[in-house]
Amino acid sequence: MTKKRKKGRIVIDRELCKGCYLCVSVCPDQLIGVSDSLNQKGYYPAEFKGNNTGEEERGCTGCATCAITCPDVAIEVYRE
């Protein structure tokens, strides 16, 4: 019997993000990166790279570490 891994996803509000990248540094699975495009305030916001599709690969677990760390409250966490 294999243990089922928790699944989650996050949504980052590009316009609220000021590009501090604290979420990038705390994500245990390194699923958050820096966007290539500016937001309306002139920052390069953080962006969710997405869950990996492979069963053995690690994906977002919905741990919410990124949302807790975000000083701009720009991250919403969804657990499935």
Image (cartoon, rainbow, N blue to C red):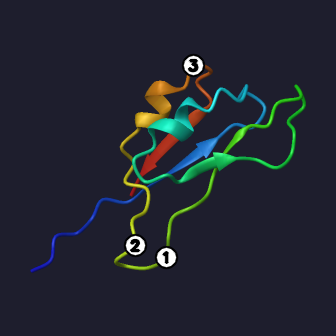
Q: Nearer the viewer, mark 3 or mark 2?
A: 2
Occupied quadrant, residue 20: top right
Occupied quadrant, residue 64: top left
**In the rendered structure, are the residues bearing label 1 and label 2 in contact, judged by CB atoms less than 8 Å apart?**
yes
Residue 57 falls left or right of residue 21: left
- SS under mark 2: loop
* Dot label at residue 14: none
Residue type, numbered disc 2? Glu
Q: Pointer 2: residues within 10 angstroms few (<14), some, or many (20+)?
A: few
Q: Residue at x 58, y 24 (%)?
A: 73
Q: Residue at x 53, y 35 (%)?
A: 23
**In the rendered structure, are the residues bearing label 1 and label 3 in contact, judged by CB atoms less than 8 Å apart?**
no
In the rendering, at what x and y percent does residue 66 appear? 48, 36
Q: How many marks?
A: 3
Between discs 1 and 3, the one toward the N terminus: 1
Between discs 3 and 2, the one toward the N terminus: 2
* Dot label at residue 71: 3
Between the residue at mark 3 and the residue at mark 2, the CA separation in whole angstroms equals 29 Å
* Dot label at residue 57: 2
Residue type, numbered disc 3? Pro
In the rendering, at what x and y percent does residue 30 appear? 49, 52
Q: Pointer 1: residues within 10 angstroms few (<14), some, or many (20+)?
A: few
62 w.r.t. 67: above or below = below
Between the residue at mark 1 and the residue at mark 3, the CA separation in whole angstroms equals 30 Å
Q: Pointer 3: residues within 10 angstroms few (<14), some, or many (20+)?
A: some
Residue that badge 1 annotates:
53
Residue type, numbered disc 1? Thr
- SS under mark 3: loop
Q: Residue at x 64, y 41 (%)?
A: 12
Residue 26 falls left or right of residue 21: left
